[in-house]
Every structure is written in C-alpha cells, then in structure tokens.
Amino acid sequence: MVMAAAGAHRPGPLKQQNKAHKGGKHSGSSQRRAGGRVPVKAQPRRRLRDLNRVDRRHQALQLRRQRKEAVLAEKRSLGSRDGPPHLVVVVLLHSRAAAHGSLRLLQSQDSAVVCADEGTAGGFALLCPRLKQRWRFVTAQAGDLHAVLDLAKVADSLLFILDPVDGWDSAGEHCLSCLFAQGLPSYALAVPGGTELPPKKRIDARKKLSKSIEKRFPDAKLFPLNTEQESSLLLRHLSSQKQRHLAFRDRRAHLLARAAEFVPSQDSNLVGTLKVSGFVRGQTLNVNSLVHIVGHGDFQLSQVDAPPDLLSLNPRVVKGQKRSQDMEVQDDSGNGADEMEEDVKVLMKADPSKQESLQSEVVPDPMEGEQTWPTEEELQEAEDSLKANRRVVKVPKGTSKYQAAWIVDDGEEGSEKDDDDEDDGMDDDLMEEAVSQEGESSEEEAGEEESETMTVSECLRDDQYDERMEEDEQMLEKYKQERMDEMFPDEVDTPRDVPARVRFQKYRGLKSFRTSPWDPKENLPRDYARIFQFQDFSRTRKNLFRQIEKEETEGASVGWYVTLHVCNVPVSVMESFKEGKPLVLFSLLPHEQKMSVLNFLVRRHPGNSEPVRAKEELIFHCGFRRFRASPLFSQHTSADKHKLERFLRPDAALVVTVYAPITFPPASVLLFKQRSNGMHDLIATGSLLSVDPDRIVIKRLVLSGHPFKIFTRTAVVRYMFFNREDVMWFKPVELRTKWGRRGHIKEPLGTHGHMKCHFDGQLKSQDTVLLNLYKRVFPKWTYDPHVPEPVPWVRSESALPEREVEME
C-alpha cells in the first residue's frame, strides 16, 4: 500500500487522446462550407483585428477629434465672412406677442449695420464687424401656415416669441405641431414684455410659463427680451448653439430669395425669366440641375451670376459701395446701369447637352405590345365572319359594291326611323327645357325689376346654419361608416338584383393571404404606362448620396451670393413675392422631377379625430414639395401583400400611396384636410417610406352567411348567395368562420342560394360563415401641384388653460 501511494500514475498506451479545442469562429468548418469563396468584407475585419490595443485607442481618438473639428468648423462658418448669413426666422406664437419691439432691440447693437430686405415685410440683415458675424432676420406672417413652414425649411434657427402670461394660443399650438412634424431646426424662446406686472406676479408668471413649456421644449431656456443686454445674450446664444440638421435639405442646395426681378418673355407677359438673388446653402448649386420653387413647380436654369455681396463684412467693400452711392452722376441713368452690369460676373451658363429635362411623365405608345401581322387562322376567321354577315339586296343596274353597302332594307329603315324619332324626342325635350329656362329667367328679371332692396338682420338668415346642418349630416354618415367598418371589417351585403359572379367578377380567392403568390405586373392600369420605375431604388439612392458626399460638383459653392436666372416662370411667382411671401428654391437631385408611386408611413395626429376615408382629397407637405392627391390607405407589414384600409385608423401606423414626383428619402410628410371654410386641419404626420410601384395593395371583401342546419362536420348555410349558379361559381373558394373553423362548399341545395358546407369541426349556432375575396387596387391619378392658400387659423385666447381643463 505504501509503495502504491508513493509511485505516480502513468497513462498506458491505450489512453484516449481528445482533440484540443480551437477558439475563434470555427474557421475550418466555415471555410469548408464556403468552398473556397472569400467574403467581400473579410479583409477589413482582419485588418481591424490585427490592430493592437494602443492603435485602436489612437484610431478612436482620431475619429472623435475629426467629428469635433467638423462640428466646430460648421459652427464657425455659419454667419461668418465665408459662409452664408445666419438665417433666423421669427415666429409669433400668440396674438398678443409683438415682434416690432423685439426686432428693434436686436437692431440696436453696438457697431452693427442694419440692411433692410426688398421682398419680405419686416426682414433685415444685421452685420456686426466687431463680432465677425452677420445675421438675417425674417418675420413669418402671423397666421400664414405656408409661409411659416416654407421659412422653417431653410432656416438655421427659429426664434419663437411667447406671451409672458399664456405662452402660446391655439394657433400657436397648431403651428408648433406642424413644425415638429416637418422637422425643427435649432430654436430659441424669447419672452418680451411682462415689465408692467408687479415683481411677485412676474416671478409667478415666469415659473408657470417655464412649467408649461416643458412638454414641448424640454430643457429649454427662456430668454427675456426687454433690454439691449438681453438682446445681445440672445444673439450670442443663437450663434453658439449646436445646429440641428434636417436630412432633406442637407443633401440639396437651397436658397431663400433676398431680391427678385421678373423679365417677361417676348411672346407673352405672363411667362418670363425670374432673376432670384440669395445665398447658396446646403450643397453646391449646379446650373444644369433643375430647381423647385416651393409652391409653384419645377423649372430650369439658364445661367448663374455673381453680383456684389451687399452683406459683406469687409469694410473696404462697404466703403466703396458708400462712395459709389454718394457720387453724383451728371449723365443719364444708363451709366449707373452699365456700372452694375460690369460688377455682375457670369459664373456659368447651362449646357443643353448636360441639362436635366423637365419631362415628368412617360408618353405611352398605344400600339406598344400590339400584334404586328395577323396569322392565317385569324385571316380565315375574318373571312368567315364576312361571309356570315353578307346579305342579299335588290339594287339598280350598274350599282357598285360600295354603293350597295349603303342601301338599307325595309327593316333597317324602320329601326333608323325609330332612332330618329328618339333623337327628335330628345331634341324636343331639350327645346322645352330651354323655353322653360327662358321663361323662368324672364320671370326672374321681371321679379328683379318689381322687387325692392331691404336690409335683413343676420338672425333671420338661416342659409349658413342649414349648410352647417348638411355638413353635420354628412359627418354623421361618415362616423357611422367608420363604426361599421370597425365592427364588421370589410363585410359587404351580397346584392340581390345582380348575380354575385357578375358583381365580384374582378375578385379572386386566396388560399392564404400571406403566402399565396400574386404577380406584381399583372393587370396594370393605363396610368402605370406614364410613370417611371427604378430597377433597384435603394441601390440608386445609396449611389447618389455617396456621390454627393465624396465627389466634388461644379457650381456655386455654399455661402456665395448669386443670382439665378430661372426660365419660363409665371408672373404669379413674382406677384406673391411682392406681397411679402417667402420665395424658397431647392435644387433637385437626378430623377426627382419624374412621376412614380410614392408610399408614406404616417400616423394619425392626436389633435384630430374626424373620420378620413380613403380616396378623399388631402394636401401633402412632403419634404420641400406640397401637392394635392387622393391617396390609398394600407397596412404596414413585412409581407409582399398589404391589405387596403377604408379609413385612416387612429391607433395604428398606415401606409399612404399616391402618384407624385420622385423624392429620395429621408423626407418628412404632413397630411392636411381642407375644411369648407378654407382652413387646413393637420390629420396625420410621418415620413417617406419608399418609391415602389410594385407594392401590392389588396382590397378584401367578406361575404357572410348564417348556418341554417348544423350537423357534426357539415352545415347548411344561407344568405351568402341567392341563386344556385353563384354557389357553383364560388365553390373553389375556402370558407372560414368568426370562431376559427375552416371549410369549403360541398354542393348547392335548391335554387335560392342554400349550400351544404363541410368544416373541420362542428359549428356553433351563433357563428358566422365568411368567404374572403381579394382584388388589387391602384391609386387614382389626382396629383395637383397647386395648393390653395389656407385661411388663417382661428385663435383662442390661450392653449395652456385648455389642456388644464382637459386634464380635469
């Protein structure tokens, strides 16, 4: 025992030898499965894995430093000598908020030069050579929703003017909802006034206002605006705060017009060349690309000029300009115009071979896809049909075949007389209507001559009240339809006057809505011949954005003050600019002027609860575009087929499908509905999902029947069809019940639509038998780029107490 304990155990020759465990990602097995193929990204991963700890830390430090330097460079360039002026849009959120006093304080800065704008009412530029900064302030017209949204598309910062007591009213709440849905740039909150309140009430009002804005603007700071010192603090905050980016404008060159001139063409005074001057922002502007004037359409450029920058921070330029203005010109004014023309330099002119086309639709060929030459069988059939249609007619001697074809028989003469009599009867009816209308008009004229004018009080006129009652009845009918669609989704009554096989002949049955195939190119409408489609939209988008980031394009760089010559612009654009409305231009990416099928992912806005039916006309604000269209609503799923929704659901995200010009996402979308009084209600917000004409939207119809006699696995069902032929026609379609049973039609019983059905289990007496039918639907071509101006929102005194009442 002692010897065994002292000696060590040694393994024998038959000991099992296990393979050593190899760490990593099983490279041997993956290589055997790959069969010699090398993945594309294997080399970069290996290179990253080869870096040691110090190198990885150094690389992360370099990337962090590059991002920080990029942010600082962007912040320094905005409003500097080389960059565009810092564009600040002043938005009034309350009817009592006044912008004149606040803007006067901002203008009263030390050593600041103020330059007034030409087009926009109340707009001015502020030049501070001491701070090496320049700003441009533009005031959005109170109540003009389109002006606020258009200016927010290009603004660097928004300056919200609040009321010191109530903050914002109902119109301000509506404006904030639209701005947040479109995309909010950097902002600041200013509170002018409040000095007339006692100190204690002033502090309480400020605390109440700070608490009320936490929901909309968390961690936001309120800036009082009553003294010059407070205005300088606000300017410093605007220039130093972090800029928030809007994706749809960062990849496109855009411009807010500071001055504009309209030169009519030789053919017509209604169309001409619009010369728009402003600072280029976003990206480099190419003269060969198209531009979109927000609210007016797409246009081509003819040339780009470089006039002298009137907002330059260089004092030499300012002195030279002042000296040229102080000089008295003894000759006629033509010399001054020549000097201005000499100052303007032509940067570039459009090349017709490289210029983008304005073609937005494909011109379809009606003969495309037609048969070019008939076959022998078709020729033989045509000859047989001619022989069958030949008739024997007595004709005078010497009559040719062509003349004989015009000779009619006695029976045909009678039919022609009947047709003539019907036409004469219609003409007589029209004549009687015309005579009666003339008589009524003469009686009305006589009544107008005999009648007197008198003033009637508004309380006696109930026409408007009756119109409102009619609107209420229409809205009540919509509420009923929406409620019925929620309780019985997609269910319809089988018609009794028309056979179901005729009424639903365009529908088909599917074994499974999720897995059954459906060809996306099957039975396309004529409108699909007018649109453009990408072979791979996501790949085109990635390649285009990669070119924008890496490749340098020729054109006017960011920060340059340029004049764009826009061709074939209607004179209404210049008239709206003279009225004080903003003129905003966006350059279009390739293919963005062409029509296609756009899909938007939207969600119902909580502030609106009215029912919105599919194919109703809505107003879209998509990125930099706005238009009218009648969309389709469908479910948002990952399947290849998507069920149509008849109403815009308040509790789920839906996909909206319309015909519209191509836009590359990301882009925000706002859906408005126009009231009868002209106001626009925000009903849904979301973003652009895809540009895909092959997205299949399926409309489902559900025919319901009731069990009449129930057996173990069979049942007699009635009220689904009302004749024997319909039962035989829909026999291949699978049945289901509301309680989860599945079955099929076995045979018809009688001639009144009763049928014997077989199920996978016994039915309950309260169950309902359903038959699903499906049909692909397409949107209607209702695209209209002209959107009417909305009526200003009706302001209530405050929006903050209303929320308190709702909470109570």
Image (cartoon, rainbow, N blue to C red):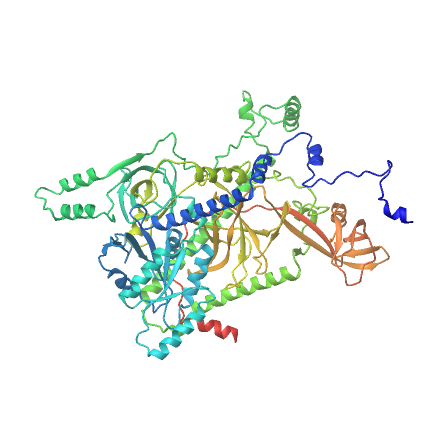
Q: Is residue 266 left or right of residue 613?
A: left
Asked whether residue 305 is in view, the answer is yes
Location of residue 475 with respect to 15 vertically, above or below: below
x and y percent of residue 433 in the render?
45, 53
Residue 37 sits above or below residue 423 on the image? above
Q: Toward which corner of the image does residue 200 lie, by quadrant?
A: bottom left
Quick one: 1 or 35, which is closer to the camera?
Answer: 1
Q: Residue at the right extreme?
A: 1
- x and y, in percent, of residue 398 in the image: 54, 20
Q: Is residue 298 above or below residue 207?
A: above
Instruction: Using the image as rendered, state which of residue 161 and residue 727 is in the foreground.
Output: 161
The residue lying toward the viewer, choosing from 718 and 215, is 215
Residue at 84%, 44% (x, y): give it.
8
- Give me the residue at 33% from left, 59% from top: 236
Which residue is at 33% across, 64% downward? 448
Pick whichever, 672 or 477, lies toward us: 672
Residue 351's quadrant in the figure? Answer: top left
